[in-house]
Image (cartoon, helix red, strand yellow):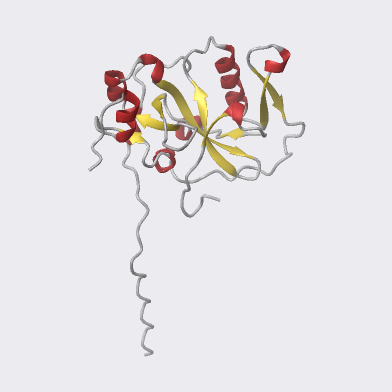
Amino acid sequence: MANKKPKPEAEENVVPLKVVKPGRLDRFKSKKKPSIGGLETSPTVLSILKIGDVGDFVRLHPNEEEYWSDELCFVSVPIINDKHDQLHLIDEEIAVRYLPTKKIRRFRLAVASKPYDVHFLCQVPSVHLDNSWNNSALKACMEAKSGWVQVSSRKEENIEGYKIDKARDADAFPPVKWPTPSLEDLIELSFHGAIIETDDHPGLLHVIGARQNMS
């Protein structure tokens, strides 16, 4: 009887992908009642965009239950030597304790894609829906679940809000290959270093003007 070939040894020094524990995003959920009811091997950092800033046709994940978050809490933190602030996730209890209401931002996040699988996290309005910009952006997000839409500002027409254009052909672009990691995995990776869940987070201290321990 021939000897069996030895099994190849497992590769060494392989660092497993960190998996987020279920329910981690619960700390950042807004407690307010809502106003309305290629990544196959490893996830990458996704940019966070408003649908009105995409500048191209867009789709939002059709599975709202699995790939649209609840309403979450955020704060914009100034970044040294950068003219743009960085959006941070923040524990709502910490946000309410330290920040004025106008600095706390609330919206949902949905996995979205431009043509040819350029994935990102789309900000979905969930408050101040009487505002025409938020209302039209939300409408665009909902329409993007079932087809390609492009959103543009109507300011030049002296109209407050967004114009929503559907793609002329439903199959104008290839079907989206949606990311397979969970929404929590994608959000935590995309907000790496920008999640405020303690009172001494440097981002929070900057926003409230508190002294930071530089040692």
Is residue 204 in view? yes
Q: Is residue 211 left or right of residue 181?
A: left
Location of residue 203 (image quadrant): top left
Of all residues, the one furthest to the top in this rendering is 130
Whether residue 33 appears in this view of the structure is no
The residue nearer to you, when weighing 154 against 130, is 154
In the image, residue 137 lies at what x, y percent? 58, 21
Residue at 49% in and 46% down:
180
| Closer to the camera in the image, 147 or 113 | 113
Quarter of the image that includes the N terminus = bottom left
Q: Residue at x 29, y 29 (%)?
A: 205
Q: Residue at x 70, y 11 (%)?
A: 158
Q: Position of residue 14 (x, y in %)?
A: 36, 63
Q: Quadrant of residue 23?
A: top left
Quadrant of the image for the C terminus?
Answer: top left
Q: Residue at x 47, y 36 (%)?
A: 82
Give percent across and percent down for residue 104. 39, 20
In the picture shown, does residue 96 fall above or below 113? above
Looking at the picture, tell me which residue is in the foreground, 23 or 211.
Answer: 211
Give the tally of numbered discs. 0
Determine the residue located farthest toward the right in the rendered image.
168
Lateral position of residue 153 relative to residue 195, left or right: right
Q: Is residue 97 left or right of residue 177?
A: left
| Image coordinates for residue 78, horizontal then vertical, percent | 42, 31
